[in-house]
Image: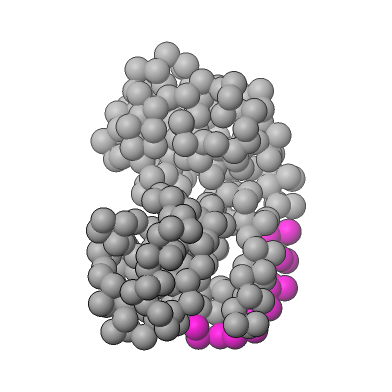
């Protein structure tokens, strides 16, 4: 029997490698795919859109915050992958009373890499996981910041406008781009106003594609209110997905940084 401690400090015990995995976290679902665990994953959420073939063919068990508990139980998983922030504690606890649940808790790149290593160990894919960690580390190390300390706000929601504060994975990603988060004095996901963005001398406003899908019309509307601020539509997956998508993130950030340097 092997015992594993998750990132919330709880332990699970497994008698063998898991062969019936349910993932309740989109970015970790993609990680399981890239670790070659197609046959082992039996359930995902309706937000697990990558890879497309899994989204189309795997059993969906509700949303990340509205898990269909009975559907998960019917799959008889020998491992459930959850996340402290993305999933509801009461639902995770209910499932953990019957099945092994490994919960991630990620607010920076280091914790994301620890998660990848741990998932690799639990699923018997350590070699692939360690190679992935090394590649991500290498690509972030090579990321070149050309214009540091750009005063930046990142919007995740409209009506009300919500941004990101310290202690979040997105904040850590912004910092790695050389962007200075103007709401870093606040925690988690503060509700903010356009006036606050103006008063904090925001030079760059990033409009995320998720969870609220900001589009060009939102950019144009905000640009009228913030004529001195550069506004860019941002791929939310690149800033908030902490699984194997991190392999693609440095190149995306490099492109964004180059755009800012040219501005």
Seen at 62% across and 25% down, the residue is 40
**Image height of 115 relative to 219, above or below:** above
Q: Quadrant of the C terminus?
A: bottom right
Q: Looking at this view, is 196 or 61 the one in front?
A: 196
Seen at 50% across and 29% down, the residue is 44
Q: Give the left or right position of residue 34, taking residue 182 as reference.
A: right
**Image height of 40 relative to 103, above or below:** above
**Image height of 114 relative to 152, above or below:** above
Residue 125 can be seen in this image: yes
Q: Quadrant of the N terminus?
A: top right
Q: How is the image coloured?
A: one colour
Q: Give the left or right position of residue 45, taking residue 262 as reference.
A: left
Picture quadrant where residue 127 is located: top right
Residue 259 is situated, as x and y percent measured from the top left of the image, at 63, 75
Residue 110 is situated, as x and y percent measured from the top left of the image, at 55, 63
Seen at 42% across and 44% down, the residue is 83
Residue 3 is situated, as x and y percent measured from the top left of the image, at 50, 38
Q: Looking at this view, is 215 or 21 the one in front?
A: 215
Q: Looking at this view, is 231 or 37 the one in front?
A: 231
Residue 81 can be seen in this image: no
Q: Looking at this view, is 262 or 129 the one in front?
A: 262
Number of marks drawn: 0
Seen at 64% across and 28% down, the residue is 53
The stretch drawn in magenta includes residue 137: yes
The stretch drawn in magenta includes residue 181: no
What are the residue bounds of the magenta stretch? 135-151
Q: Residue furthest top?
A: 74
Q: Give the left or right position of residue 171, taking residue 87 as reference.
A: right
């Amino acid at each position: 029997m092997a015992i594993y401690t998750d990132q919330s400090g709880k332990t699970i015990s497994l008698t063998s490698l898991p062969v019936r995995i349910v993932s309740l976290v989109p970015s970790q679902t993609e990680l399981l795919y890239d670790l070659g665990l197609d046959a082992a994953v039996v359930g995902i959420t309706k937000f697990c859109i990558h890879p497309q073939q899994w989204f189309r063919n795997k059993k969906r068990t509700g949303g990340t915050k509205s898990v269909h508990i009975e559907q998960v139980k019917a799959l008889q998983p020998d491992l459930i992958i959850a996340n402290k922030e993305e999933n509801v504690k009461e639902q995770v606890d209910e499932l953990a009373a019957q099945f092994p649940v490994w919960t991630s808790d990620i607010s920076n790149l280091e914790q994301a890499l620890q998660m990848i290593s741990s998932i690799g160990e639990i699923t018997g894919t350590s070699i692939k996981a360690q190679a992935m960690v090394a590649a991500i580390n290498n690509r972030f190390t090579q990321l070149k910041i050309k214009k540091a300390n750009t005063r930046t706000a990142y919007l995740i929601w409209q009506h009300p406008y919500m941004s990101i504060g310290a202690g979040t994975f997105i904040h850590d990603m912004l910092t790695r781009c050389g962007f200075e988060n103007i709401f870093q004095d606040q925690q988690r996901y503060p509700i903010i106003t356009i006036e606050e963005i103006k008063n904090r001398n925001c030079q760059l406003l990033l409009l995320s594609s998720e969870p609220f899908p900001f589009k060009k019309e939102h950019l144009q509307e905000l640009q009228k209110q913030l004529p001195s601020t550069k506004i860019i539509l941002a791929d939310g997956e690149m800033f908030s997905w902490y699984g194997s998508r991190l392999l693609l993130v440095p190149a995306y950030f490099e492109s964004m940084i180059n755009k800012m340097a040219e501005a």
